[in-house]
Image: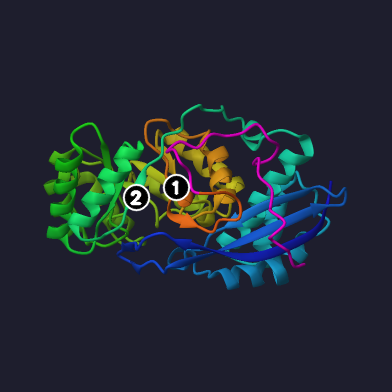
Amino acid sequence: MKINKVETQIIETRFMESFHTTYGKIPSSHPHLIVKITTDKGVAGFGEASPLPMFTGETVEIMKVAVDKELGPAIIGQEIFELDEIHKVMNRVLGKASAAKSAIDLALWDLKGKSLNIPVYKLLGGTKKKNLELAYVLGDEPIDQMIIKAEEKRNMGFSTFKIKVGTTPEKDISSVKAIRDALGPDVRIRVDANQGFDVKTALHVINKIAPYSIDYIEPPVREWDIAGLKQVRQGSPIPVMADESLYSPHQALTLIKEEAVDLFAIKLIKTGGITPALKIVSMADAAGIDCVVISPWDSWLGTYANLHFATLLTERYAHELVGPFYLTDDPFGTIPNKVSISINEGSGFGIVAPPSITFET
């Protein structure tokens, strides 16, 4: 089967509550690029990219132009199963543009599954898991608000929480302590500094929060500071994860060679989709590094795509596939009433675009 048509549409969802990180306050609404790829046999697949401009430099409008004007036309006529070749074509047309490429890549995986009438996780060689544990992310809010939200979500069934830190060290330390005291010893906690510290401050905060049983800390220093990241890891009693420092297999290789981190965060909008992410996962597996998939602010479409991909990854840590718990007005589904998301046995990602979404070539 060959690619016959590439179409796009932008949709918007709304956040149910405010959310702050070191990057600032998240806007009240969130855009998503939806890509539809149709073959010469009339089979269609769907992909999503939910933008994080502070990571990839792409707004949803930039992604749409990239797909409509450059990437989409370049891959017309390509065989849908030749994903490595398709990525080579896209990379020749546009450097970086990882989020736009991810939306195309996911649509192709969905398309492959639908053309063969099997779920994507089986194409990937994954194993369907009955209960994939999810982590809930707490924004950098006033401590009392964070505690109320954490207790509410624990009562829903969440047993792993990520706490956003990195703005005010002493407040960060107090937040972690307060949430541990409120939730007790059985809940798992991880923290994410979003590059908010220098090495000295990172080690100060880490050593202060270490007694509260922390799974790991996401990038405490700037993404380019691999030497600093390694220095933090060497002095840290808490495992250190790479996120903003990890986009490509080449960066994964550098992090492994430098022994700079203990874990990898995989965001498909950073890797360019599942196809490049598989190479990172293979390298991490060879180096003994666990990977945790993070699907920030995706609709149900992107969430299911990441769920299929997550069947390949560690069960030691909860994955962050919780966009539908934060967002309303999602045309692909409604807010979950339980904390686990199950893979259905439909073909592809098991989801189709509703009639309310119209596409442009």
Residue 348 highlighted magenta (yes or no): yes
Q: Is 166 displayed left or right of 249 in the figure?
A: left
Q: Position of residue 229 (x, y in %)?
A: 29, 53
Tell me if residue 216 comes above or below residue 133 in the rendering: below
Residue 115 or residue 284, whichever sits in front: 115
Q: Is residue 313 above or below residue 295?
A: above
In magenta, the rendered stretch is 335-361
In this view of the protein, can residue 190 be seen by the observer?
Answer: no
**Kind of element beneath mark 2:** strand
Q: What's the mark number on residue 322?
A: 1
Residue 333 pos. (x, y %): 57, 49
Q: Nearer the viewer, residue 154 or 195?
A: 154
Res 287 label? none
- What's under tag 1, amino acid-wise? Val
Q: What predominant SS class does the magenta segment belong to?
A: loop
Q: Which residue is mark 2?
A: 137
Name the kind of residue labelled 2 in the image. Answer: Val
